[in-house]
Amino acid sequence: MATVEARGITKVFTQGERGAVNDVNLLTREGEFMVFLGPSGSGKTTLLRMIAGLEDPTAGDILIGGQVVTHLAPRDRRIAMVFQSYALYPHLSVYNNIAFPLKAQGVPKEQHEDKVRWAAELLGIGALLQRKPRELSGGERQRVALARAIVREPTVFLLDEPLSNLDAKLRASAREELTQFHHRVGTTTIYVTHDQIEAMAMGDRIVVLHEGYVRQVGSPREVYDDPADTFVATFLGSPPMNLIDHGDVLVGFRPEHLLPRDMVPGPAVAIGVRVTGVEYLGSERILYALIDRDRFAEQKVVAKLPATYETGAVDGRAMEFAVAERNLRFFDKTTGKRAASRSLTWG
Amino acid sequence: MGVSRGAERLGIAMFAPALIYIFALVGTPLFLAFLYSVGDVTVGSVGYRFVGLENFASVLQNPTFRGALWHSFLFTVGAQLIVIICANMLALALVDRFRGRGLVRFFILLPWVAPISLGAIGWKWILDSIYSVINWALVKLHLVGPFDTPMWLGESSLAMMSVIMVHAWRMLPFSTVILLAGLTAIPKDIPEAAAVDGAGFWRTHFQITLPMMAPIINVAVLFGVIFTFTDMTVVYILTRGGPYDSTQVLPSLAFFTGILGGDLAEGAAISVFLVPILVVIAWLMLRLAHRAEVV
Amino acid sequence: MALHATARRRLSFRIYRWSVLSVFSVLLAFPFVWMAITSFKQTSDLYNVDNNPFLFNETPTLEHVNLLFEETMFPQWFFNTMFAGAVVVLITLLLAVPAAYALARLTGRWGERLGIGIFLVYLIPPTLLFIPMSRVVSLLGLQDSLWSIIVVYPTFTVPFSIWLLMGFFKSIPRDLEDAAMVDGLTRFQAFTRLVIPISFSGILTVVIFSFTLVTQEFVYALTFISSASHQTIGVGVPIYLVRGDVYYWGSLMAACLIASIPIAFFYNLFLDRFISGFTVGAVK
């Protein structure tokens, strides 16, 4: 178990163009489950590959366990990686797939069987050892990839979107199993994904990346409740945070905080809206509306209400909504960065 | 996927001309080849007389034939061994993009693309007993004496070596291209996973890359065997089968016997010996065509 | 200069690549370079054993090339080969394009079996068929005529082309023709007006490869055609550019060069398409 550190890591693929990764500084804690979250092109996979040693950084250093490993080959870094496609060796049995890293690193033959069985049991695939990858389901292949990663007892795990090839239904249970796996094994893990639900559910801390820059590092609560800029604010949360143009500043509030006036106690800002659409999703209701207030009129907002609450909302109806003051977030209009709170003159 | 009656009929109509053509112009001679081999037919003969296995018996007793059979195997296996090793090396060198790759590929492909006969006659000039440029170089480098120069096409074992080399020279581009296709079909993250797992270059190549290429290597070998085993052009042009039939192979012997010699029946009998090998190869091909899909 | 592990690896691979490529390019292309040098060397230079063969010890000359075009049947052979090639390609297209489409689209399970069968036909060698084939040719009265090979060559160009084209046609989504048929075209019209234009590059590839197969062929032309004026380049050059036992090496090499390089050029242009067709078509 070790920490992973990135110091000033930059990767430029084409001279003169913006780098895929720009001056990233990170330090994981020991045993942490850290998530790199961002849309495609954000640099999260490139960053992971540099930590793995599969790409050379243009500038900066990678440290694992306090040692500089920037120009070391992957095999010398004591890491293990699970690829998005799992990259199982198709001509080898599951047993031999898992045993391959042991062979490659010169582990004495007598120890192979015990270690392979231990890894297989850990992932519940003990019965599949003689099969070939093409005979396995997606979920089973993923477990083989994990077993192959764990068998060498690496200091760091690197996972590149391991759940994206699974059926949507399977993903939730696979997610839970991965979390339990992490608790049992406790290895420092870096997990790359574009799915913010996965990030929120699994991460101890989330690194939000956009266009090669780190936008924010924080616990799920921090990035959700205290976003550092408009990108983080709108990337996390579904539906995304409402952003209202308030003259010199952007005002943000989450859909679940935009509620009918009588549901909002304490200091709040009133927002009159005209409903344009209602979606009933079973467990909740999504309301689409336009602000009725003069200066801010015609700006779109979204509200998310538990389905148990009957609002009587229909298309075209004018309603009084409000947001508690403590749920308002302010962002600088030009930079998008988080600005200080202020009192709103609404009118 | 259900197909309507009309569509089925259209399909048959579109396929029929090719089928009829091939059936007539391949099936007939194929059938005749077997018929001649068990008959008594010469260029001048009019009728047909069934003689059973007489031709095969006389052919098998002929030492020239046994030599040709042996040479066919020797040349094919020898050339293929050289080709597979060299094609592997070449494919590895060509797999990444680099500047000038197109031009390099042009030069490497020349032996395969040029008509076989012309490449062979080019080699005949290079290996000429008096004017061989190789011999000139050997003498200049003091590796052989000026009156000791090797008779590349005139001395039996050298001639055999020369034929094998020319076959290998011709097949190498073809096999390289096929192996290259197999190499590039390997997903990029497999060697990366092997690198993370701790495998160095050689272990990855022999335990991961080559086994994954195995189906396509087999396809390349099978094609190579067919093209070499059934070829008469190289031998005909380089040595005419000589010296003293030491480079004679089945197809060239069949030509000399059947066409130049006029004994169609015996010539057919000789060429029929090609069939068992072809059948084995065809069967292997079919088995492997399925495997090559699963890469 | 201390190199990092990764940089060291990359350097050693570069060294490997360039040494392998230089050695093999030389080995493979050398005969053609040699053809070029020989074609332009004066006879006295060529046959003088004391001269360095790599240098032009006397001024380069066009005499061999002139001899080739003026005093041999080379131009005739060239024309014969071009003519035969064109007609064979035409026949091949007429037979193979519909057949490949039928196999790729319309015949279900039979399509698979027939496809394999076609492939196997391609593997039947001329050296097995040429003896009875010569009889068939004389029966048809085509002996010693260019038409003998024009009729026979499609026996290998057609299976090969069907095999190649099947792969191309299969990669065209069926929805395209279905949409056309919904719009009112018959299936055959969809074929001629939609599929063929889309497959143009595939068909062009087949044209090039069939043409090269024609130019490369030796056995049938040697067997069926006996007079020099009807012969093709592939047989005419190695066989007839000799007087008795004496080879006219200068002209011979010039002929080889002229016959090989243009073909190589076109082949190279279309090789990538062939490869993608090969890996799709070969494995169905």
Image (cartoon, coloured by chain):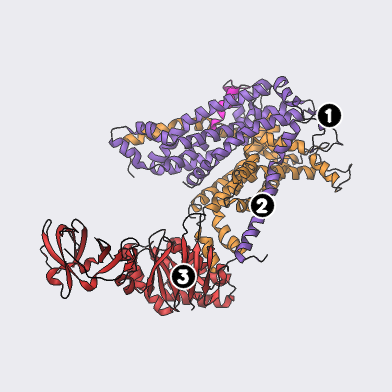
Instruction: Kindly identify which chain the residue marked by label 3 belongs to.
Output: A
- The boundaries of the magenta stretch are C138-155
| Residue at disc 2, secondary structure | helix
Q: Which quadrant would residue C16 be assigned to in this image?
A: bottom right
Tell me the number on the disc at residue A25: 3
Rendered shade, chain A? red
Instruction: Answer whether residue A114 is visible to the viewer in this image.
Output: yes
Q: Which quadrant would residue C193 be assigned to in this image?
A: top left
User: Rounded to the nearest whole Å, what is the CA distance between mark 1 and mark 2?
Assistant: 38 Å
Rendered shade, chain B? orange
Q: Is residue C279 magenta?
A: no
Q: Does the CB distance between marks 1 and 3 fall below 8 Å?
A: no
User: Rounded to the nearest whole Å, what is the CA distance between mark 3 and mark 2?
Assistant: 39 Å
Residue C167 percent location from the top left of the image = 46, 42
Looking at the image, which residue is at 45% across and 63% down? A45
Of discs 1 and 2, which sits in the foreground? 2
Tell me the number on the disc at residue C44: 1
Instruction: Kindly identify which chain the residue marked by label 2 belongs to.
Output: C
Residue C63 percent location from the top left of the image = 76, 25
Tell me the number on the disc at residue C18: 2
Crowdedness near tag 1: few (<14), some (14–19) or many (≥20) residues, C-alpha within 10 Å? few
Which chain is represented by purple in the image?
A: C
Nearest the eye: A77 or A184: A77
Q: Which quadrant would residue B118 be assigned to in this image?
A: top right
| Residue at disc 1, secondary structure | helix
Q: Is residue C139 magenta?
A: yes
